[in-house]
Image: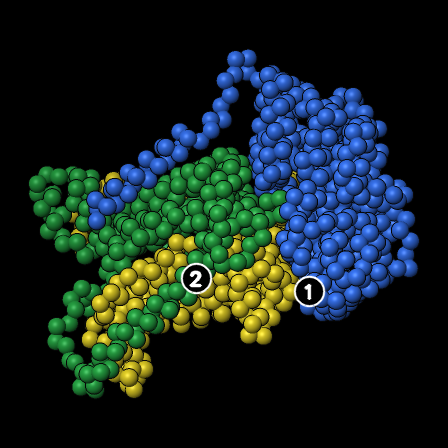
Chain colours: A green, B yellow, C blue
Amino acid sequence: MSAVTASTTTTRTGLREGELRHRLYPIVMHAIMLTAVLLVTFPLIYAIILSTQSGALGSLRPGPALLDNVQRAWDSAKMGLLMRNTLIVALAVAIGKIILSLLGAFALIYFRVRFGGLIMALVMLTHLLPLPVRIVPTYELLTEFGWVDTFWGLTIPFFASATGLLLFQQFFRTVPTDLADAARVDGAGPFRFLVSILIPVSRTNIGALFLIEFVYMWNQYLWPLLVANSDSTRQVQIGIKQLVASDAVIEWGVVMAGSMMVIIPPLVVLLTLQRSLMTGLTGATEDL
Amino acid sequence: MNIVFPNRILPYLLLAPSILLVLIFFLYPAVQSVDLSLYLVNRVRDVKVYVGMENFQRLFESDAYLNSLQVTGLFTLTVVVSALVISLALAVGASQPIRGFGVYRTLLIWTYALSPAIAGVIWALLTDPAIGVLTEVLESFGIAFNWRRSNTDALLFVAMAATWKILGYDILFFLAGLKNIPRDVLEAAAIDGAGAWLRFRRMVLPLLRPTILFLVIMNTLYASFETFGLIDITTQGGPGRATDLLIYRLYLDGFRSSSRIGLASAQSIVLLLMVATLTIIQYRFISRRTFYQ
Amino acid sequence: MSKVVRRMLVTALLVVVALSLAAPSLSVTAQDEPVTINFWHAMSGSRGEVVQAQVDEFNAANPDINVVAEFSGSYAETLTKALAAYSAGEAPDIVQVYEVGTRTMLDSGAIVPVMEVSGGELDQSQFVRPILNYYAIDDELRCMPFNSSTAMLYYNKDLFEAAGLDPEQPPQTFSEVFEMGRQIVDSGAAPYAISFGWPAWILEQMFGMHDQLLADADGGRTGLASEIYFNSEFGVQVLTEWQRWADEGLLFYGGREYSANDPFIAGEFAMLAQSTSSLGGIENAVEFELGTAFLPALDGYERTGNNVVGGGCLWTMAGQTEEEYDAVWRFYQFLSQTDQSVFWHKETGYFPATNAAVDALEEEGWFDENPNFRTAFDQILAGNDTVASRGVLLGDFVIIRDIVGAAIEDAVVNGVDPQEALDAAVEESNQVLEDYAALAG
């Protein structure tokens, strides 16, 4: 079933039931959805209000301490540095995964690969083995590599991706073969074809994968808790934990200000790329 | 097939990094997990004593572990069911072909950007026993809610925070799924009051079935593994062991002790079996679907 | 869309570059290559800033040494990480470990006793007795005392007055806590009467101050403990009392660490048993008149022991060069200087570790002006030095404290019978001790 083609043969059964209902319907729906959005967003609004307060919290009236709280989160948990660290990790993993899965899918679809099925099965194994089922030995491995408290340790174990490989493989199958044939006739090598034709037509999928991986890495908690020992590699989520566990008296205003800061980058990525994800997903759903 | 390029070696070179990473960081540690689960291990002093299946036996005789299994099951079920029901309702609502509804689609998916840890902190404040706004609201209805003092409330609290965070993700996928459904089906289903539910069940739900199955699996994995940060930053498994999820137990035994690494590895193997079951179900029902983290 | 993607990536990269440039450079302009000493600690927030200030002062005065202080996570995380780093050959030179990790550090084979680091120069008698007692094994200090604390009772004098109680007469026994608590709640002065921070630790404190032994092998001080006594008649009685407070609606259960501080400050209850190290933070935050007192004693038992010392100690990791040990020792000496010890105490509320610092504080009238800071001190010096009150040393204590913490919650929150809850916890903990002993080599 196609995603985009909205049906043109509309059967307006609803109209016959009553003009009034049809008129009222959008208004009622708007009211319902508005309420729903407010309910879902309320915790965030509350958090934003709290981030402007200092001392005793709990009221719903914004206070004057926002800048002060931001400043203190920035200083005492070194949020600036932590955001930088997390940005490095999230970008490295998102981009690394995209490149590796593009190359892998390219190899599997456009070349003759013996044992291609076996290789695919191997990569699919990663689905069976999320981090928790191998966390102790993986950490030991990092210790052996000397990768504890390094960006290598925070990123490399995440590079392999069955998700990406499958996504691109599926997509490449839908790319017309004559595009590649034409490229070959023109004398373009495989990399020329990959870079100048395949990647541009895959941009929606690339955007979708980037969004998923960026948000996933940005929100990592357990692995950075184990791997990062110092400010130079510590990740933002642990910074929030640090603010909460900080000191004898928890400054909730500061914690909230820090949290709001941390939400911004993944939110920006989400809002920028949500259309890619939607289209990418819609495309993927067709295969079901 | 699309095979066009004749190179013999190049494809293997392109695949090599992925294969190597899978072997080094997935397969090898998984095998190691199995091996370690048969030993008592002290990481610091590098001592290993072979104990066979004793770690597994001990696990299933331990009240703490059995409790974690139960708590995780209950928590996961609550999160998956409530997240799917709420997000499906919201997604169907936001998909109505009404002018201006595009904005709801954006406003409803943003919790996707949140981390479970931050969701936890926000809900901890909302429901704080002393200063929480939600606590006060509940109090005015005569409901005493205190997640530090009640097992049920604690589990409810973490489930609410976890559900809230995953709503955005689920809504996003439902919206994508609903895009495949012709506008008039949706519209007609909604306007036609009496028959709405029937139409929804007969026409919309079957089309969304793959999306629902996919989300059930993803939300189950999310609830059982990704909520570690939420637990660690709020209840730390308490009160008592009311929110002591399997993943949290695994962390405590594997990384807070020096002599329970074997026991932690045995827990990893149990988790592996659970994930395997889920994956098989997934392949049975939704063959070619990819995973999204 | 691809344009959008590209623009986004470029923006993101620019942000990375900008942030990298803005982030303070860690490199030191080294002319004659100072010795670098890595110091991992668990002091976040304002305490972390105090540590950093001390380190900065030391570095400025000692250009040939560069101490790099690094916050490495909570106490439990820091312990795990330091030992893992040692296995990987990347251990820091100094690591701050809380009292719970003492046995693990001793048995790890990863440390050098502080006496050895000092080349025998360390004068143990300079330290306040209970602190020395906790960290000395066979009368020899193994680590450098740094941030020591104990638990005491904080109370809200305004609420006492509102309840018609004498604000200068805090409760001294459990039964007084109960009676006064009743009056506080019944009079409507506050919704609850009392709460704890670190409940499992408070229970350990109870054992120490009533001279009750917590484990065999002299509390793990003359060998590896194989059995703990939390479920003794005494332990069960304490927990039964706590459960009664909870059942009567007097106890506000406030979590396992510092979460009870905020509601105490907000006046949700009138009494708080909490680490003395929270004093600075609480004093700054409260708008009522704050009182402090000794932890109340259990009726029917004599308060003969000391309050057990908790907090952190600095351990020196093995495998460093002579030059580094020398630098570490100079840093330790600096930290135990009277002015540093006094500064540390005033800024954080932790005990000044040395007798000289106590005298100095006394002399300048600090304790007279700040009687709340005196309470903690008087308390650890009030009892007798007994085997039980030196504090227990247990293998994998981190896990055991978690087990006991859960048992306390089971009794106080979930109404589980205290004897049953503690029996189960002891059984589980003894298993941990058995595993630990099996691997102790």
Instruction: Residue under label 1, please give it.
Output: C191
Disc 2 vs disc 1: Cβ atoms closer than 8 Å?
Answer: no
In the displayed structure image, the side of residue B98 where residue C236 appears, left or right: right
Q: Is residue C420 above or below residue B247?
A: below
Task: Give the residue at the far top of this rendering.
Answer: C32
**Tag count in the figure?**
2
Residue C30 percent across, percent down from the top left: 52, 16
Instruction: Residue under label 2, please give it.
Output: A42
User: In which chain is the residue bearing label 2?
Assistant: A
Residue at 82%, 38% in the rendered image: C130
Mark 2 packing: few (<14 Cα in 10 Å), some, or many (20+)?
A: few
The local secondary structure at tag 2 comes to helix
Q: Is residue B119 above or below residue A54?
A: below
Residue C338 percent across, percent down from the top left: 75, 26
In the displayed structure image, the side of residue B111 where residue A138 appears, left or right: right
In the displayed structure image, the side of residue A208 where residue C118 appears, left or right: right
Q: Depth check: give the residue in front, B235 or A112.
A: B235
Residue at 84%, 54% in the rendered image: C169
Q: Which mark is residue B273?
A: none
Residue A147 percent across, percent down from the top left: 49, 36
Residue A49 in sight in this render: yes
Residue A137 in sight in this render: no
The local secondary structure at tag 1 comes to loop
